[in-house]
Image (tube, rainbow, N blue to C red):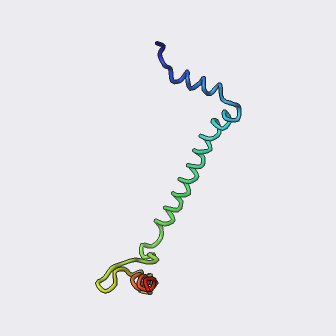
Amino acid sequence: MQEYNFWADLLDTYQSLSDWVKALWLLVPPGFLLALSVIISKHKIAYKKAENQAPDSLTYTIFQNDNKPSQSLMQGDKQISDNRSDRDTYRQ
């Protein structure tokens, strides 16, 4: 039995492909790497902008207390919504 050579099989398969598939095979990996580098660089820029913001720039928070199971509050104690009352309204 003959030995199997992966690289010879891969090159033989590549040679038997049509020209447009060969072109795609050559263009897709660099395009993927280019898109990945753009996504990573945009993420790094956004992360640095978020890191430079003041730590007290929280827009809202959700907490629980004894009377109401969950409540959403904005910064400065301005109430947005009370989830318990919303659920009771939809049940009726």
Place of residue 59 in the rendered image (x, y in percent of width and height, measured from the top left): 46, 77
How many numbered marks are there?
0
Place of residue 10 in the rendered image (x, y in percent of width and height, measured from the top left): 56, 26
Place of residue 91 in the rendered image (x, y in percent of width and height, measured from the top left): 43, 83
Task: Give the farthest residue toward the front.
Answer: 92
Decide which of 78, 90 is in the foreground and name it. Answer: 90
Examine the image and state in which quarter residue 17 appears.
top right
Quadrant (top left/top right/bottom left/bottom right) for the C terminus: bottom left
Task: Give the farthest residue toward the left.
Answer: 66
Examine the image and state in which quarter residue 78 appears.
bottom left
Is residue 76 in view from this perspective? no
> Is 33 displayed left or right of 69 in the figure?
right
Is residue 86 in view from this perspective? yes
For image coordinates 71% across by 31% down, the residue present is 19
In the image, residue 57 sits, relative to residue 11, either above or below, namely below
For image coordinates 59% across by 45% down, the residue present is 32
Task: Give the farthest residue toward the top.
Answer: 1
Place of residue 45 in the rendered image (x, y in percent of width and height, measured from the top left): 53, 59
Examine the image and state in which quarter residue 13 appears.
top right
Decide which of 87, 64 is in the foreground and name it. Answer: 87
In the image, residue 2 sits, relative to residue 49, either above or below, namely above
For image coordinates 31% across by 82% down, the residue present is 65
In the image, residue 46 sits, relative to residue 26, either above or below, namely below
